[in-house]
Image (cartoon, rainbow, N blue to C red):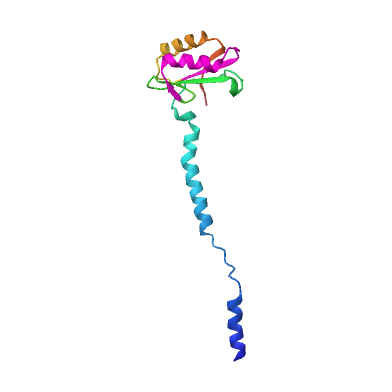
Amino acid sequence: MKSRFSRLRRKKDRPYLEINLMPLIDVALNLLIIFMVATPMLQQENGIQVELPRGNVKETDDSISQQIVVHINKKGQFFIDGVITKMENLLDAIKQKAGSKGDKTVFVKADTSVPYGKVIELVDQIKHIGGVRYVALATSKVD
């Protein structure tokens, strides 16, 4: 009889060796959902939706630090660095960002539905700002 109790006692003394995977699965699925929600937001530049005209030529190879990007959306609103700006304040903001060195490139990313005259008027005004070396009309790559 002593042997039977000793066997039961041995089973109770063994450590519990099972690993619970449920917390790991929960964390993995939560991360997957977060990335699925965040990825489309990262693909849009600053959340500004602009449908660019199509083109084959890349305008310039400048570094990003020497670029100023101006967006014009479908509604005709102006954005600089993702912040909505009025036309009067836009030129002042570009002057401030450009400085006086004359080495900045300004990219105008205008939606295809924006009237051509409005885009050219903006480009013409930007060309007269000191510190701006080049004004480029941004296009999307033709597939």
Q: Work out which quarter of the rendered image holds the N terminus and state it.
A: bottom right
Q: Residue at image x 42%, y 14%?
A: 88
Q: How many marks?
A: 0
Residue 55: tell me if it is visible. no
Q: Is residue 63 left or right of residue 50?
A: right
Is residue 103 shown above or below 49?
Answer: above
**Residue 73, how many percent across, how many down?**
41, 22
Q: Percent position (x, y) of residue 23?
A: 51, 57
Q: Is residue 130 left or right of residue 73?
A: right
The image position of residue 62, as x and y in percent, is 61, 20
The magenta stretch is: 83-109
Which residue is situated farthest in the left direction here? 75
The residue sitting at 41% across, 11% down in the picture is 117
Q: Nearer the viewer, residue 104 or 72?
A: 104
Instruction: Please name the residue shown 58% across and 12% down the image.
Output: 100
Name the residue at the bottom extreme. Answer: 1
- In the rendered image, which quarter is residue 21 located in? bottom right
Q: Is 3 on the left-hand or right-hand side of 33?
A: right
- Can residue 133 be seen in the rendering of this structure? yes
The one nearer the camera, 40 or 77, is 77
Q: Position of residue 65 (x, y in %)?
A: 59, 23
Q: Considering only vertical position in the picture, is 132 above or below 79?
A: above
